[in-house]
Structures are given as C-alpha cells and as structure tokens.
Amino acid sequence: MIILKNGLCVDPASETETISDIAIKDGVICAIEDHIDPSLYVKEGECVDVYDCSGLIIGPGLVDAHVHFRDPGFTHKEDIYTGAEAAIRGGVTSVIMMANTKPAIDNTETLRYVIEKGKETGIHVYSAATVTKGLKGTELTDMKALKEAGAVAFTDDGIPLLSEDMARAAMEEAVKNDVVLSFHEEDPLYITNNGVNRGKASEYFGIGGSDRQAEISMVQRDIRLAKETGACINIQHISTAEAVECVRRARKEGLGDIIHAEATPHHMSMTEEDTIRYGTNAKMNPPLRTENDRNAIIQGIVDGTIECIATDHAPHTFEEKNVPIDKAPSGIIGLETSFSVSYNTLVRCGKLSLVQLFCKMSLNPARIYKISAGELAIYRTADILIFDPNKIHSFDKSRSKSFNSPLAKCTITGDVVGTISSGVMLGCDIEDRLERMTP
C-alpha cells in the first residue's frame, strides 16, 4: 500500500484542487481524504509506504496521444522499453504509439507485437494503426480488424494523406467503425526542405523551408470532409495561427464532438528563432513558426480550441542529427520535459489553472481516444504524476536512447518527482520523504 500525504491533489474530471491524502491499494485509489489513517486500510502487519508530499502537486498520470517508439524497424533510435522509461520520467502513464514503423502497423500481426511488448513496460502502451497500407496513401487498411485487435486510432502520421478521395473514403470507413482519424497536415506542394519555417529561419539557413500554407490548406480540406462525413478527426501538432482559427470556427459551428486538435509543448513555447539557435535539434515537422503563431496556439489552448497537448516524441540518433540542417531528419524528443514546459508556459504565467492543464494532458486525450485514464478519483486506476513546481534541474541526460532536444543541457524549473502506474511507484525522486510503516 502507498499513501501520499499533504499534496495538492488535482482532479480534472471533478475540477477540484485540494490538499489531501491519497491511499493506493491493489492498483486502485481507495481513498482521498483530509487525513488517512493507514491502519484503516491494511491488515495488521502489512507494510505501508507513506510519502510526505507537502508542497508537491499530485495529478492523474499524463496521457500522451502522440509518441514514436520506433519499434519495430528503427530500434537504434528508440524501442518500446526505452520509450516507456522516458515516459515514466515525465509522469506519462499512458501513450499512443504512432504507426509509421518498419513494417508499418497496418496489419494485426505487427499491431499485436507492439501491444504485447507494451504490456511488459509497467505503463499503459496503446497503438494507432495506419490509415493506408504501407503508408502509401492508395489503399485503406482493414480498420474493423485492426480495431478488434486493439488499435485505438488510425493515422499515417509522418506522411500527409494527399488524395482527397482517399481522405473521404477513410473518413467514411472511420464512421462505420467508430474510430478516430489523426491527421498529419502538410502539403508538400508548399514545401522545399521541410522542418524549417519558410521565413526568417529558412532565409538564415539558405533553404526553401515549409510555407505555412502547407498546413492551412490541408486543415481546411479535412475539416470540410469531416463536416460532410461526420468523421471524428484530430489535427496533429498544429503550428499556424490560421489553422488554429480553422479549428476554432469549426468547433463554434457545432462540430466540437468530431473536430479535435493537439499542440506540442515545443510549438507553444518556441519559435523559428529557436531553430536558428539550436539547429537540427529544433528541426521538426511541422516546423517552429513565428511568435504570432506561438501566441495563437496558446490562445487556442486557453479558449478550448486545442483540447490536447501531446509531445510528438520523435527520437533520432546523434549521428543522424549531426549533419547540415537540410540533411537531418525532423523530430525531437519530449516525454521527459512535457509537463515542466507546459506548466511553465501555461500555469506559472497564469494562462491556465492546474485543473485545465491536466484536462489538456490527461483527461481530454483519454476521452477522445476512449482510454480509461485521466482522473484522480476513488476507485480509479492509480496512475499518478507527482510534480515539484519549484525544483530546478538540468536536462542533461535522457532515459530515451536519443537526446535530440533543444532543451538538452538547459536548466528547467519544475520537475516530475514521482510516477505511479497501476499502483506501482515506477519513478521516484522523493525517497527522502518516505516513511515505511507497519500499522
């Protein structure tokens, strides 16, 4: 049994923040009270781990609906085990893996492989399957069979679905099977050398870059098709002010049940100036854009246009990133720093409350993808994040196999100091606050 005492307990489902004790037994939260007497919940002689969480924030474990664990096919960058370790370090207890592996997760055999491997990690590892076979954009996968085998979403993430006819067919099939489609919105017609914003950053590096219209045009198309078909879609890693406004208009028109959007911690906290500063470690698709775009993303998060924060955790090796920027792959890691960055960007400066932040990072993604997670409540699975808002730490190493982050070697205020998944303390930096008791 574990008891967490005197922490600021945040439950986004009930919209509450209270200083409370939490009792955890047999993988479940069995009590949340002002004061918990361990002897009331354990048999005589059983051991209880009691942690003093005074000054700490306790919330539901994060649900990251967009991660790349590179398994199978690219395990030199990451695998499911190391990806899960990075998640644990960041307080993430549920993840949805993207399907652009090798082989792609377009068949039940590969899907079952990643799901079974995920069961060995200690956290809840879910997987998306691809929309099209082989990520080729020409033939739909068997969504019914893949859903029955465990796929919680469908996406060709990493590759935009360019054919409007195929996008429409995918949406119609998604409606039949009651599944969510998650879209990577970048039209290559507007891109030369992706991963860098067309503007100040592309001019600095002397390359073509990615024009904002690449995202805007496809977001407009897919919202239109979703409205026509009734499909539930998610706009991945939104990066432009215009795309945010497209989603806002759609949701105001009554499409809030089917039109969703996610933003990354890096797009809400960085701009193309950081691409210039950090080079390939700040190169990603879609790219970091302007300060106006960054502010528009934050406003979209604040007003509910953007419901989810997801990392797009995308590991690459040092050798792959240590090349000229037009040759380097796009993507950065983010699982270990996502809550700290989001807390500093949104809560510390008064833009969101803690309840609202946990909605964006736990409850909302769980509800959209129909995952049992995101609540800090009695009888719920004990998936818990413990956060010290004042701890200053340096992100000088990674649990991931890779370390491609613009935050590498940076000092960050606020740190995840404990992660509990299914009632098991998997990551803990507060052992000095532990008292073992035998009531």
Image (tube, helix red, strand yellow):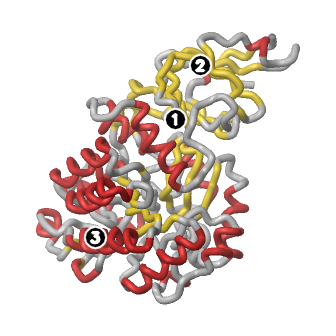
Left or right, 422 with respect to 97, comes to right
Residue 217 at x, y percent in the picture: 25, 73
Which kind of residue does numbered mark 3 sit on? Gln
Q: Earlier in the sequence, mark 1 or mark 2?
A: 1
Give the CA separation, mark 3 to mark 1: 31 Å
Query: Which residue is tagged 3?
Result: 220
Query: Which residue is tagged 2?
Result: 432
Query: Which residue is tagged 1?
Result: 13
Q: Is residue 174 above or below residue 40?
A: below
Q: Residue furthest bottom?
A: 138
How dense is the environment of label 2, judged by Cα within 10 Å: few (below 14), some, or many (20 and up)?
few
**In the picture, residue 188 is in which quadrant?**
bottom left
Labels 1 and 2 touching (C-beta < 8 A): no
Quick check: can you spot residue 294? yes
How dense is the environment of label 1, judged by Cα within 10 Å: few (below 14), some, or many (20 and up)?
some
Residue 390 at x, y percent in the picture: 39, 24
Q: Nearer the viewer, residue 92 or 231?
A: 231
The residue at 68%/22% (across/down) is 31
The residue at 40%/33% (across/down) is 393
**Which quadrant, please, contains the C terminus?**
top right
- Label 1: state its secondary structure: loop
The residue at 72%/53% (across/down) is 120
Quick check: can you spot residue 282? no
The residue at 57%/73% (across/down) is 176
**Which quadrant, please, contains the N terminus?**
top right
